[in-house]
Image: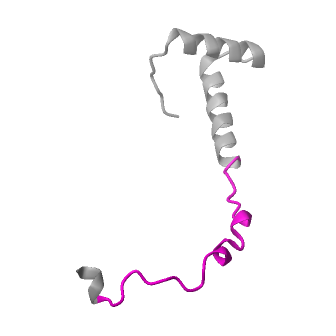
Amino acid sequence: MGQININVTPEFEAALARLMRLRGIRSKSEAIREAVAESAERVTSAAPVADFSQWIGAALKAPLKRARRFATHDDLWR
């Protein structure tokens, strides 16, 4: 297993101590491992699902024949 050395803020230290107290974890490394694993699980399991149901029929609202802006293709470049 690899080793990671980090510098933490007092706020992080307090949050880590709170997590350890609430979960009954004795070591900081175990608390960090558990928090990272839980966070990774939450992120991967809560992937947003695309819902395009509101788009159904949206194209039917547009006119089928639009008025041309240019009479010919050459008019486009003038």
Query: Magenta: predominant secondary structure element?
Result: loop
Q: Position of residue 66 (x, y in %)?
A: 52, 82
Pick the front one: 55 or 24: 55
Most extreme residue toward the bottom is 72
Whether residue 24 is situated above or below residue 71 in the rendered picture: above
69 vs 44, left or right, is left
Whether residue 23 is situated above or below residue 74 in the rendered picture: above
Q: Position of residue 45 (x, y in %)?
A: 70, 48
Pick the front one: 41 or 55: 55
Q: Exactly how many numbered labels are in the figure?
A: 0
Q: Which residues are magenta?
A: 46-73
35 vs 70, left or right, is right
Task: Please tell me in which quadrant of the rendered image residue 23 appears.
Answer: top right
Pick the front one: 68 or 20: 68
Image point (48%, 28%), residue name: 3
Image point (49%, 33%), residue name: 2
Q: Position of residue 34 (x, y in %)?
A: 67, 29
Image point (40%, 80%), residue name: 69
